[in-house]
Image (tube, helix red, strand yellow):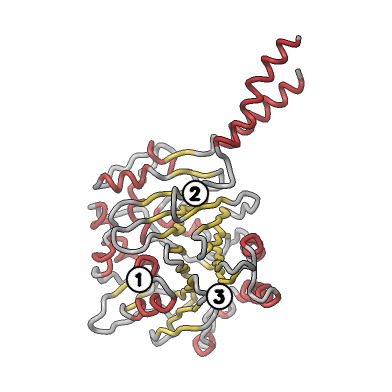
Amino acid sequence: MNRCLFVVAVALSALSICSSLCYASDNPAHYLKTEEQKASAASIEKLGDKGLYKMEYSADYRLDEVLKSGSRTSDDLLKFLLAELLGVENSQAALPSFGCSAFAVRTKSGDRIFGRNFDYNQFDAGVEGNAAVLMRVRPKEGYSSVGMVPGAFAGFGTDSLCDGETDISNTALFPFLIMDGMNEAGLAVSVLWLDEFPTSQDESGKYDITTTVALRLMLDRAATVEEAAKLLGDYNMWSAFPRASFHFLVADKTGAAKVLEYDNDNVLHVFDANYVTNFYLNEDVQALITTPSHHDHGLDRYNKIEARLKAASNVLSENEAMALLKDVSQKPGETGTSNTRWSVVYNLSSLTAKVAAAQDYDNIFSFRLKGDGGGSSGCNHGFFALFLLPALFIPALWRRKH
């Protein structure tokens, strides 16, 4: 009988694990305007218990209109998106500061992979917990892509996307809140915080865009690093924050990798580099920073990445890439750029992604850009059945023998 009770207990444990999965379809979404927006919101599924979600975004997010909107700040962008996509004038969306690490390498088999940590203190956004959303987008015009969205930037905490209570209309904004991503052409992009010298280009004849719009633009319309750099040059870049700038690590499946960075005079520079953190690669600009905490922001993480990649001759497996991300992850702290919210490894050759949420490196979730979007290394029905079926049959067998 003790064996039977043990198996039943194991089955119940499996059921408990599976019960952490939930869907957003029960949450209210009063401001969504189209059936496609509603379907996109309803597709949100929570994976595990660390605030990781996946989402199929099928609605029109009106990229062309956003590019022409002239948004120069995050507030300008949010106001336009809320009016254009939801028909409202205010929201809980917020954009806190963040600090990150990213690198691009190859595997022994020749696949090109792209690793990235996203670090931020979610309390700057006024919410508690971590909601990280891996979103797949298939625009009618442009490349399909997957990208990671910090739910806190739209006011969502760990469980609020499927708690049955929180209005999830803000999920319509997600295409313009991504922090990193990969498209079907094998291009990966990520944005990383830089202290001071906010970019503010004002060349006549060019539309103004902000940082996260630039990410969406590159994923939708660039197949290579060269194309991505050219796209940025076609627009006036405006930092999403009045007190900081950003640079981008961009890589593609050919092995090309560049850092796109604006200097204090708003000039775009392209650096031949495959890893980066949160200080300027432009030494002339970095020398102008006088605040001690800003001068070497991320240098410790940069040095760890550099040493590891040089020792490995820029060759890492996906598991080794994730281990490196773990090594440079940041624990929760008081600074706005502390606390790694997710680590992701994109394979630009196979078009797959592996994600660890909230520094839970024992549970890696896997996704595919093409096909059904993939599942995870976490709970699935087959896994559950392995434990449930013995629990159902063993009691009957025990009764027959006793």
| Residue denoted by label 1 | 210
Where's residue 356, x and y in %?
58, 54
Query: What residue sits right under mark 3 in the picture?
Result: 276
- Amino acid type for the residue under numbered disc 2: Gly
Neighbour tally class for label 3: few under 14, some 14-19, many 20 plus, Cα within 10 Å: many
Q: Amino acid at mark 1?
A: Thr
Question: Decide: marks 2, 3 in contact (CB < 8 A)?
Answer: no
Comparing 184 with 319, the one in front is 184
Q: Which mark is residue 297?
A: none
The residue positioned 69% from the left and 20% from the top of the image is 394
* Left or right of residue 382: residue 175: left
Q: Residues within 10 Å of mark 2 (few under 14, many from 20)?
A: few
Spatial CA distance of label 3 from label 1 is 21 Å
Closer-to-camera residue (123/71): 71
Of marks 2 and 1, the one in the foreground: 2
Residue that badge 2 annotates = 374
